[in-house]
Image (cartoon, coloured by chain):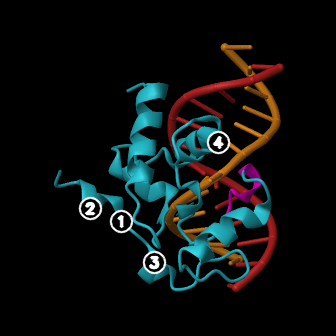
Chain colours: A cyan, B orange, C red
Amino acid sequence: MKIDRADFQQAVYDVVRSIPRGRATSYGAIAEAIGFPNHSRLVGKVMNGCSSTDEHIPAHRVVNSQGKLVGGGSFSTPDQMKQLLQSEGIEVSENRIRNWKNVFWNPMEELKML
DNA sequence: AGCCTGACGCCGC
DNA sequence: CGCGGCGCCAGGC
């Protein structure tokens, strides 16, 4: 099944905007939540363009499955992502979220019942 | 159409 | 625990 760019992008934004402050999720989790388990990379692609949109997307709350802050390159500075997370109370050490297990926010658990 | 790349993820070493 | 390989799919050349 082919994926509609706009639809996929919208779905991703919708999920990301639903991420509570002080929490974070992963690309794979988002992809799974919107029904495309194998499209984690596309989620990343979409997030790459998040800066190009007017929607205020908390892109900094999206990291990889290890809780690592990959993607800092799309921010003003690589540390921007880290700073934003820390300002929300998320502890980050060396480009990595501490307590990732606890900080992780599963979109499926929160959105599947909608 | 073929080839390379990428904000990923998992498994092996 | 870091590194590398492979799978994944869409997009740019």
Label 2 is placed on what type of residue? Answer: Glu
Are the residues flagged by discs 1 and 2 in contact, CB closer than 8 Å?
yes
Q: Which residue is mark 2?
A: A110
Query: In the structure shown, which secondary structural element does the residue marked by tag 3 occupy?
Result: helix
> Marks 1 and 3, Cα distance to the nearest angstrom?
10 Å
- How many C-alpha atoms fall within 10 Å of the one at disc 4: few (<14), some, or many (≥20)? some
Q: Is residue A65 above or below residue C1?
A: above
Which of the labelled discs sits on residue A97, or is there none?
A: none
Q: Horizontal and vertical percent for residue A44?
A: 59, 47
Q: Which residue is mark 1?
A: A106
> Residue lying farthest left?
A113
Chain identity of mark 4: A
Q: Horizontal and vertical percent for residue A91?
A: 59, 83
Task: Magenta stretch: give its range.
Answer: A70-74
Q: Which residue is mark 3?
A: A103
Which badge, 4 or 2, comes first in the chain's sequence? Answer: 4
